[in-house]
C-alpha cells in the first residue's frame, strides 16, 4: 500500500466549485485510502513551524513539489506495461485509464489525480474502475503480490487529501460499483454498492418514504462507501446519530484480496467483535469497502426552520438546552453562526440579513416531524418561551420552502463567502460544548495581540470567525486572510492544537485525518491508542507500511 | 485469562428471581469475561446431539460436573496464599473475599460463583473488588504475570454464562466502581464508572430531564459497564439506537494492565480507528471496561401504550410499516407476541386478557414524546387508520400508568409464565423481518411431526411460541416443555441454527455468546471474520489463550 509521509496542509482557495454539488455545499467528505501504519505517530509533535499550517495557497501544483520532503517509498514497484496488461485483461479496456503505455490520456487521468479544491495533486498514471467485488479482490491481491501502491477513491470530495495519490499510486475508483442492491420496505434496511452516490440513494429512499440517515453538502458527488469509510457526520447527526449506529453491515476487501463479508442486515447481532466498526472511519487504510447495508429512518412529512439572534454564548447554550427539551424528538438540526461569519456572508452576497438587528450569535433550528401542525405548534411555543425568558432576542420562522433555503444559505454560504475574500485557515474541531466558542475568542485575541488582525490591508487577517454544528459540539474555526503571511501560521499553530488537546477535544471532528492531519493524531489520541491502531493495521494489512 | 472449553447449555428453570429486578423483568444481560481466543471456532459444527441444547434442567450443580468434558487449562497457576496476600495488600481486606486461606467464606463467595438462573456454577475461591482503575490495572498485571485466570463480573445478570467462573478463576467484581462521575446538562453527556447500576444512572438522569438510552429488565442489578461490554439491546433500541452509536468513549484495562483511556465525551472524533467499538460487545474478552461516557437523549414527557390483535404475520408487518410511517419520531417500542405466548401467560396469571377475542398475533406499541396531546392525537389517528384498513382487528389504548403497566405485563410476563410451566428451550435470534415468525412455524411443525407436541402428558412439548422486539427483528423463540426428553433437543438442533444461518440471521441477537453459544459462532460469522477476531484478540491480549 502507498507510503505517505506527513504533508504540510495547504491554504485553501476555492478555485472551482465541486461537480454536482447540491444545495448544501458545506461539507464534502474525504475518501478511502490505504495509509501506512508507521505514520500513525505516537509522539505528540511540539514544533510545527515548518510543517503544519491548516491552509496555504496552491493552484494545481503537485503535492510532491509543494512538499519536497515527501519521498516515494522505494519498496513499491514501478508500474510496467505487463501490469497494465493484467488489469486490462481483468477489467476490460473501458475500465482502465492507462497513462503508462499511452500518452494521450493525461486529461482523462487528471480528475482522479487531484482533489476538488486543487489542494493535492498526484502523479498517478493508472486508474482502475472495478465493477464487482471479485474484481476489487483480484486487483488488490495482484497489487499486494507485486508491491504496487494503491489509493482507493470514491467521489473524491474529501477535504484532507485522503482520496488522491501523491506519487504514482494506482487509483482504484469505485464509481462503477454504484448499484442499489436491495431495500426492505418494512424494516427500512438499504443495501448498496460502495460507489452509489449518496443523493441517488436518498432519492431512491424518498420514493419509498424513507431517508438516508446522513446528509451533507457533497451529497451529489460523494459515494456511500466513502461516507462510511470516512465516518461522515454532516448536518443531521444530531437527529439520526452516527454511522457507527446506523450501518448494519458491510463487505470489504483487505489488502491481500481477502473478501470480508459482513453484509449483515440485522439491527442486533451479538456474535463476537463488531468488525465492521473498524472499517467505519478507517479512511481506507485497512481495506476497500465494496458494499454497505444501513438502517434508514422514516422520511419526515414536515420541515420547519427558525433563525434567531442571541446575546452571548451562554444564551446559545440555554437555547440549545431548551430546544432539546421542548422540540425533543422533532429537532433535526441546531446550527451556530457568529456575527463575524454572518457579516462576511453579507459582505459577499449583499443579501438582506434575516434579522434587523445584529447579535453576537445566531442559531438556525430545523425540525422534522410526521405532523406539520404539531411541529408548528411545538416550534411556536418554543420560540415564544425562549423569547419570553430573554434567551433569544429576535427570531424569524421560515414560512415556505424558499424561505427555508434562504435561511439555510446564511449557514451554508459561509465557506463560499470566505473563499471569495482570500485564503482561509480552516479547523474542523470538536470541543466540549461549554468551551466551544472560547476557541474562537482565544484565537482572535491571540491574532489581535500579535498585531495581525485589522480592517486595513497591512493586517493579513481580516477576521477570526466560528460556526458549526452546535448539536454535535462541532466547531468550524475559520481565520480569513487577505494575503499569505507566515506569521499567521506561527500564531495559530501549535496553539490551536494544544488548546484543543488541553480540553480533550478532537482535532478532526468529521473531516478525518487524511494526509493533512495524520501527523497530528497525537493531539487527540494517546500513544497507547495509537499503538493499538498500529496493531490493528498490521492485523488487517501485514504487508502495508 | 480463563480457559473456557465449550459447554452444553442448560435447561432453564427459574428457581429464584433475580435480585432487585425492576418492572421489566424480561431481559437480564450477560457480563464481561475474558474468553480464550482459541475457542472462537472457525468451523461450523454440524452435529450437536451431545453438546448443544439451548436449555436443560439444573439446580446449582457445578458447571464442571454438568459438563465433565470441560477441563481446567493446566497452564494457569493455582492461587496461593502469597497471591492472596498481594491482593489484600493492594485492595485492603474488605475488598477481598478470600476462600483460599480461610474456610468460613463459602457463603459469601457463592453469589459470585453462580449466575442468577443457577444454570452455571464455578469453583471460584477468590473475589476481588477493585475501587479504582489503577487497582484493576494492578490486579490484571499481576494475574497476567503470574498466569492467574480471571473472570470480570458486573451485575451478574447474564443469560449465557459469561459472568461466572467454571473452575477457580478469580472473579474481578466491579460493583465498588459505581460512581457517577460527570454530567453535562447542555450536551447530555454522562460519564460513569463501569459498576454503576443502570437504574441508578437512569434515575440520576431523570432528575436532570434526561434518559439513559438503554432500558432492560435487569436494570435494577446490571452494570453500565456490563451493558456496554455485552452490547445490551433491550426494549427501546428501536428509538435510541444501539450502544455502538450512543457510547462516546470508554476507559478499559487490557489483560497486561495497560489502561486504554478513550473516555472521549465528543459526538464527533474522526482521528483514527474507533477502538472503543471493539470493546462494545466483546464480552470482556479483550479488556475490562472501567469507565463509560454516553450520549443521553431528552426524557419524554408523555408516554402512551396500545395493544392490539392481528390476523396474520403479514398484517403485523403492515402494522409495523404504518406505525413507523405515522408515529415516526414518537414510536419507542413495537413488540410482538403470538397467541401461544399469551395463552400461557393467561394460564399462569389468570388475568383478564386485554382484548375480548383471540388472534394469532398481538402487538404492543409504545410512544414517547414531548407533548402528550400531540402524541395522543397521532396514536388515535394511527389506530383508526389501521383498523379502517383492516390491518388491526381489535385494539386497546392504556389510559393511565396502571393500564400501561398492565399491558406491558402481557409482553414482559412471558418468560416468567413459561418458567412456571416447566423447562424452556430459549433461542434469542435475529432474522430478516419478513421471515421472523416463520422460524416459530417451522419449528412447531417439526416438533409436531416428531410427535413431541401435544396437550397430554406423554408429549414432552407443551407449546412452541414466539415473541420479541419486532422493531429490531429480534425474536425470542421458546419451546415450553413438561419434562426433559432428549428427543426434543435432537429435533431442535442443529435445525434451528441451520435455519437461521440459511437466512443470514444471528444466533445471538442481544444476549451474546458467553459460554452457552461460543461454539456456534460459525452459524453467524464466517471463517474470515472469526480469523480476524482471533487476530484482534491476540493484538489486545497476547498471553490469553
Image (tube, coloured by chain):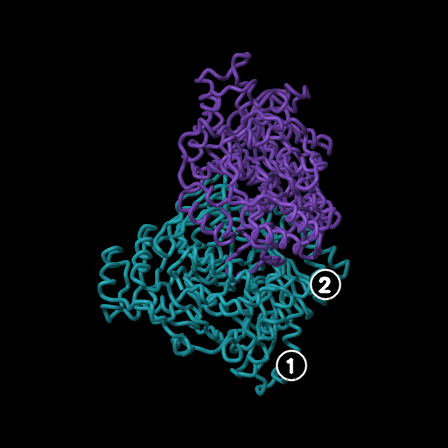
Chain colours: A purple, B cyan
| Residue ID for mark 1 | B448
Question: Which chain is indicated by disc 1?
Answer: B
Instruction: Please say whether residue A430 is visible from this viewpoint.
Output: no
| Position of residue B394 measured from the top left corner of the image (x, y, whole percent) | 70, 63
| Residue drawn at (28%, 64%) of the image | B97
Residue furthest right in the image: B389
| Position of residue A169 measured from the top left corner of the image (x, y, whole percent) | 59, 42
Question: Which chain is indicated by disc 2?
Answer: B
Q: How many marks?
A: 2
Residue in the foreground of this view, choosing between B1 and B335 = B1
A395 to A20, vertically: above or below:
above
| Position of residue A262 measured from the top left corner of the image (x, y, whole percent) | 59, 58
| Labels 2 and 1 share a subunit | yes
| Residue ID for mark 2 | B315
Secondary structure under tag 1 reads helix
- Would residue A497 be found to the left or right of residue A80 on screen? left
Answer with mark 2 or mark 1, whichever residue precedes in sequence. 2
Amino acid at each position: 500500500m502507498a507510503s505517505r509521509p506527513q504533508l504540510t496542509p495547504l491554504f485553501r482557495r476555492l478555485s472551482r466549485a465541486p461537480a454536482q454539488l447540491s444545495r448544501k455545499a458545506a461539507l464534502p467528505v474525504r475518501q478511502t485510502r490505504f495509509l501506512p501504519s508507521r505514520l500513525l505517530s505516537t509522539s505528540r509533535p511540539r514544533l510545527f513551524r515548518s510543517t503544519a499550517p491548516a491552509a496555504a495557497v496552491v493552484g494545481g501544483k503537485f503535492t510532491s513539489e509543494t512538499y519536497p520532503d515527501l519521498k516515494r517509498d522505494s519498496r513499491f514497484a514501478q508500474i510496467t506495461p505487463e501490469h497494465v496488461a493484467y488489469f486490462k485483461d481483468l477489467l476490460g479496456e473501458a475500465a482502465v485509464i492507462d497513462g503508462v503505455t499511452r500518452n494521450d490520456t493525461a486529461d482523462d487521468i487528471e480528475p482522479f489525480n487531484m482533489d476538488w479544491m486543487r489542494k493535492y495533486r498526484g502523479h498517478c498514471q493508472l486508474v482502475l474502475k472495478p465493477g464487482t467485488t471479485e474484481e476489487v479482490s483480484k486487483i488488490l491481491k495482484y497489487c499486494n503480490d507485486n508491491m504496487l501502491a494503491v489509493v482507493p477513491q470514491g467521489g473524491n470530495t474529501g477535504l484532507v487529501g485522503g482520496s488522491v495519490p501523491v506519487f504514482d499510486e494506482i487509483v482504484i475508483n469505485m464509481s462503477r460499483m454504484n448499484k442499489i442492491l436491495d431495500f426492505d420496505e418494512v424494516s427500512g434496511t438499504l443495501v448498496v454498492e460502495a460507489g452509489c452516490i449518496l443523493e441517488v440513494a436518498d432519492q431512491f429512499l424518498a420514493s419509498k418514504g424513507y431517508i438516508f440517515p446522513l446528509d451533507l453538502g457533497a451529497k451529489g458527488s460523494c459515494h456511500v462507501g466513502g461516507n462510511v469509510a470516512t465516518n461522515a457526520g454532516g448536518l443531521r447527526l444530531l437527529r439520526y446519530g452516527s454511522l457507527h449506529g446506523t450501518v448494519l453491515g458491510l463487505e470489504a476487501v483487505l489488502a491481500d484480496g481477502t473478501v470480508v463479508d459482513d453484509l449483515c442486515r440485522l439491527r442486533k447481532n451479538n456474535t463476537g467483535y463488531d468488525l465492521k466498526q473498524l472499517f467505519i472511519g478507517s479512511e481506507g487504510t485497512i481495506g476497500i469497502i465494496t458494499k454497505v447495508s444501513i438502517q434508514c429512518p422514516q422520511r419526515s412529512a414536515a420541515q420547519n426552520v427558525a433563525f434567531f439572534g442571541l446575546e452571548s454564548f451562554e444564551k446559545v447554550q440555554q437555547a440549545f438546552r431548551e430546544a432539546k427539551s421542548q422540540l425533543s424528538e422533532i429537532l433535526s438540526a441546531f446550527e451556530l453562526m457568529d456575527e463575524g461569519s454572518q457579516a462576511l456572508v453579507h459582505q459577499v452576497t449583499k443579501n438582506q440579513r434575516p434579522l434587523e438587528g445584529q447579535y453576537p450569535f445566531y442559531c438556525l433550528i430545523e425540525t422534522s416531524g410526521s405532523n406539520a401542525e404539531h411541529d408548528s405548534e411545538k416550534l411556536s411555543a418554543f420560540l415564544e418561551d425562549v423569547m419570553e425568558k430573554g434567551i433569544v432576542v429576535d427570531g424569524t420562522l421560515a414560512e415556505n420552502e424558499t424561505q427555508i433555503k434562504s435561511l439555510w444559505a446564511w449557514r451554508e454560504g459561509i465557506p463560499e463567502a470566505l473563499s471569495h475574500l482570500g485564503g482561509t485557515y480552516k479547523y474542523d474541531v470538536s470541543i466540549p460544548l461549554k468551551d466551544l466558542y472560547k476557541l474562537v475568542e482565544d484565537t482572535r485575541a491571540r491574532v489581535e495581540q500579535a498585531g495581525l488582525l485589522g480592517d486595513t490591508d497591512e493586517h493579513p487577517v481580516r477576521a477570526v470567525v466560528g460556526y458549526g454544528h452546535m448539536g454535535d459540539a462541532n466547531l468550524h474555526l475559520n481565520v480569513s486572510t487577505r494575503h499569505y503571511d507566515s506569521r499567521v501560521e506561527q500564531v495559530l499553530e501549535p496553539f490551536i492544537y494544544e488548546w484543543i488537546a488541553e480540553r480533550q477535544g478532537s482535532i478532526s471532528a468529521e473531516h478525518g485525518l487524511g494526509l493533512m492531519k495524520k501527523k497530528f493524531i497525537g493531539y487527540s489520541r494517546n500513544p497507547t491508542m495509537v499503538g493499538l491502531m498500529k496493531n490493528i493495521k498490521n492485523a488487517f494489512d501485514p504487508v502495508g507500511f
